Image (cartoon, rainbow, N blue to C red):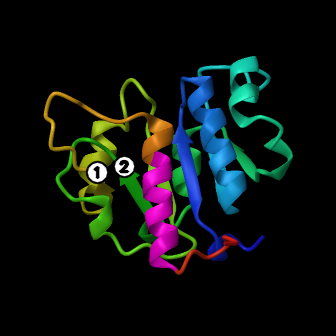
């Protein structure tokens, strides 16, 4: 698989196994590469993780990184998009291209504040008119943003 022809989802220090399992299933279904950045908040043989991904794990291209710094050093920053609740720029305003990376922080804290400040122009959010709801589930958010990226690119890699 050529990394420039597909999208990438990056989970930085994910904590909740079912979220990661659901996102792995999403990645397998869409030919999207899944990057997991350690430390993980669970073991990869966790039963909840496996259950959420069902028997699709063999169809997922998963890449592990020992740290977020190691991941960032290996990337072209022009291909990175950071999802956060701490910006006003909507994900639907981005112009996604194959080879882009959709980066999500841990469920309880999100991405580091210094990173968001450094890449403020690369930060995106899902607008939510109900201010009583802070954020959506990580797996749901990943699915929404990924399918927008695929839609913008004539659903590359998807069979209808």
Label 2: which residue? 83
**Which is more N-terminal, label 1 or label 2?**
2
Work out which quarter of the rendered image holds the N terminus and state it.
bottom right
Q: Position of residue 58 (x, y in %)?
A: 86, 46
Q: Is residue 109 visible?
A: yes
Q: Position of residue 103 (x, y in %)?
A: 47, 50
Q: Nearer the viewer, residue 67 or 18?
A: 18
- Does residue 77 sit above or below 24 in this rendering? below
* Distance of label 2 from label 1 (alpha carbons): 6 Å
- What secondary structure is the magenta-colored segment mainly? helix
Q: In terms of image quadrants, where is residue 4?
A: bottom right
Which residues fall within the magenta stretch?
142-153
Residue drawn at point x = 33 percent, y = 69 percent: 94
Work out which quarter of the rendered image holds the C terminus and state it.
bottom right
Label 1: which residue? 125
| Residue that extends furthest to the bottom in the rendered view of this protein | 154
Local SS, label 2: strand
- Does residue 155 sit above or below 72 in this rendering? below
Residue drawn at point x = 58 percent, y = 47 percent: 70
- Check disc 1: other Cα within 10 Å, few if <14, some if 14-19, many if 20+: many
Q: Is residue 104 visible?
A: no
Q: Nearer the viewer, residue 114 or 154?
A: 154
Give the side of residue 86 with respect to residue 26, left or right. left
Give the side of residue 77 with respect to residue 13, left or right. left
Residue drawn at point x = 62 percent, y = 25 percent: 17
Count of numbered circles in the view? 2
Instruction: Check if mark 2's residue and mark 1's residue have beta carbons within 8 Å.
Output: yes
């Amino acid at each position: 698989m050529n990394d420039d022809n597909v999208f990438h989802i990056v989970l930085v220090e994910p904590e909740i196994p079912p979220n990661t399992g659901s996102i792995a299933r999403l990645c397998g279904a869409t030919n999207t590469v899944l990057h997991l950045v350690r430390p993980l908040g669970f073991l990869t043989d966790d039963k909840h993780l496996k259950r959420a991904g069902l028997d699709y794990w063999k169809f997922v291209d998963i890449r592990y990184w020992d740290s977020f710094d190691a991941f960032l050093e290996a990337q072209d920053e022009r291909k990175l998009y950071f999802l956060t609740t701490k910006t006003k720029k909507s994900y639907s305003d981005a112009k996604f291209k194959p080879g882009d990376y959709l980066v999500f922080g841990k469920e309880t804290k999100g991405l580091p504040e210094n990173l968001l400040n450094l890449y403020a122009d690369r930060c995106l959010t899902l607008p939510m008119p109900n201010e009583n709801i802070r954020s959506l589930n990580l797996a749901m958010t990943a699915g929404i943003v990924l399918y927008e990226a695929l839609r913008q690119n004539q659903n590359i890699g998807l069979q209808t």
